[in-house]
Image (spheres, grey):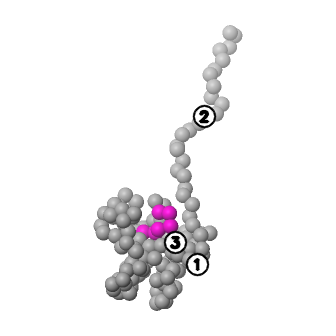
Amino acid sequence: MLLIKRNTPEFKAIKTLISDYTDKATAKKFILLYSLKPYQNLSEKILLNTLKKDSAVLYSLAYDGLREYIFSKNKKLFRDDSVYYFKSNSDAKPIEQPFAFKGKLKKELAPLLAKPVLKATGKVIQIGRGTKKKKGV
């Protein structure tokens, strides 16, 4: 799980792509939307793009929700492998509005992907503080 901060190029590109594909018919081809029940794992997601019954309506509703989340200051964007999702904070259990990019959009985002940042361990190494030599011994 990697937090994608709002000021990163990756977040800005995602926000632009979501906005640009709002009323395009090709959105369903390149932007994969998933559904989850509350407290389900990401591995249990259901792809809305391939549903047979009422798929256009469900996809449209999910896409509208995705747009709301991407512009909301209260939700944080996370990425796990190639699937993005929202949570209220890092410790929150429920995963909300999972989505992914496919094809040319995935290739467009590839160079912008944020790299995980390793935290410093906080260990202090003292240099030049060895044992004192006694004078005259």
Label 1 vs 3, first from the N-terminus: 3
Q: Earlier in the sequence, mark 3 or mark 2?
A: 3
Magenta segment, which residues? 80-85
From the viewer's perspective, tell me whether residue 109 is left or right of residue 40.
right
Q: To which residue does mark 1 refer?
A: 104
**Residue 83, image x and y in percent?**
47, 68
Residue matched to label 2: 126
Query: How far is the residue under mark 3 from the one under mark 2?
Result: 40 Å
The disc, 2 or 1, on the residue closer to the chain's N-terminal end is 1
Depth check: 120 or 80 in front? 80
Q: Residue at x 30, y 67 (%)?
A: 38
Estimate how packed mark 1 is, as few (under 14), some (14 to 19) or many (20 or more) residues with alpha carbons within 10 Å: few
Q: Nearer the viewer, mark 1 or mark 3?
A: 1
> What amino acid is at disc 3?
Phe
Rendering quarter of residue 125:
top right
For the point 40% across and 74% down, the residue is 47
**Element class at badge 1:** helix
User: What residue appears at the point 50 percent right and 67 percent down from the top-left corner?
Assistant: 82
| CA distance for labels 2 and 1 | 51 Å
Residue 113 position, x and y percent, is: 57, 67
Picture coordinates of residue 110, whole percent (x, y)? 59, 70
Residue 11, numbered label? 3
Tell me where residue 61 sits by quadrant: bottom left
- Residue 125 versus residue 42 in the image, above or below: above
Which residue ends up furthest to the left in the rendered image? 38
Residue at 55%, 70% in the rendered image: 10
Circle 2 residues within 10 Å: few <14, some 14–19, many ≥20: few
Going by the numbered disc 1, the residue's amino acid type is Lys
Q: Position of residue 137 (x, y in %)?
A: 68, 9
